[in-house]
Amino acid sequence: MTQFSAARLEQGDATVLLHFAGHAFEPLPSGGLYWHAERTLLVADLHLEKFSSFAKRGSLLPPYDTTKTLKRLEADVARTGAERIIALGDSFHRDEGTGTLLDADRLRLMALLGKTHWTWVSGNHDPSPHVLGGVCVDRLEHRGLVLVHEPRRGTPGLVGGHLHPAAHIQVEGRSVRRPCFVHDGAVLVLPAYGSSTGSINILSPAFMGLFDYRALEVTMIGKDRVYPVSVKRLVV
């Protein structure tokens, strides 16, 4: 990926706010979305224990992805003061991941569960409830929002994950592709939060039919900041 200067996308150091369904959120460089009014941190697609799942299938990878993701989550909770975490599905790469956590990662997760009220929304990778702590639900409705894993058109105020959105843009002749937050006023999709996750271009067939592209708003994740970008700059 071509490196780019933050100043080429947006000027100034003001906090970027994302306005959706009558609420204001702060999109974080980690991929989390902080809801200040509710002191709630929204995250999608943690995919904890992904590498341990691969190891069971013969692909031996260092099992440090979970540690990296949980440290990122710790930093976001410390930075924002979040009192609640809502994980929008695929929190574990497989249901059995809740039982393969390294001792240090289990302690780290238990500490986070002790500091915050945690809601786990089920995903396609982890559909079964578990007993780690917090509340396991299929979906959550709160203050006009419908929080789910797999986004679908037709429900106003729907917030989900699953698709791992990324924006590909052209800036001064250079090509930049980064994870992003994307919404059209009716459906909002968060980027994947997990350290071992990939991403999909929001102009790819996977997103067709989900958004009204005339109303699309895109916030791209940079190295240390997030940047609203013009839809006119999007490329396949």
Image (cartoon, rainbow, N blue to C red):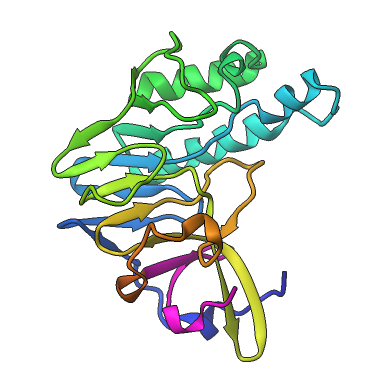
Q: Residue at x 71, y 74 (%)?
A: 2
Which residues lie in the magenta part?
A: 217-236
The answer to whether 21 appears left or right of 175 in the picture is left
Q: Residue at x 59, y 64 (%)?
A: 178
Quarter location, residue 145: top left
Query: Where, quadrant-wise, is the N terminus in this rendering?
Result: bottom right
Q: Residue at x 53, y 36 (%)?
A: 46
Quarter location, residue 212: bottom left
Q: Residue at x 40, y 52 (%)?
A: 189
Does 234 lie within the magenta span?
yes
Query: Where, quadrant-wise, is the C terminus in this rendering?
Result: bottom right
Q: Going by the picture, which residue comes out furthest to the bottom? A: 172
Question: Residue 214 location in percent, x, y?
Answer: 32, 76
Q: Nearer the viewer, residue 135 or 54?
A: 54
The answer to whether 121 appears left or right of 174 in the picture is left
Question: Residue 67 location in percent, x, y?
Answer: 64, 30
88 lies above or below 187: above
Q: Nearer the viewer, residue 29 or 49?
A: 49
6 lies above or below 139: below
Does 226 lie within the magenta span?
yes
Quarter location, residue 65: top right
Number of callouts: 0
Q: Nearer the viewer, residue 43 or 225?
A: 43
Q: Nearer the viewer, residue 78 or 25?
A: 25
91 lies above or below 169: above
Question: Residue 159 location in percent, x, y?
Answer: 32, 46
232 lies above or below 101: below
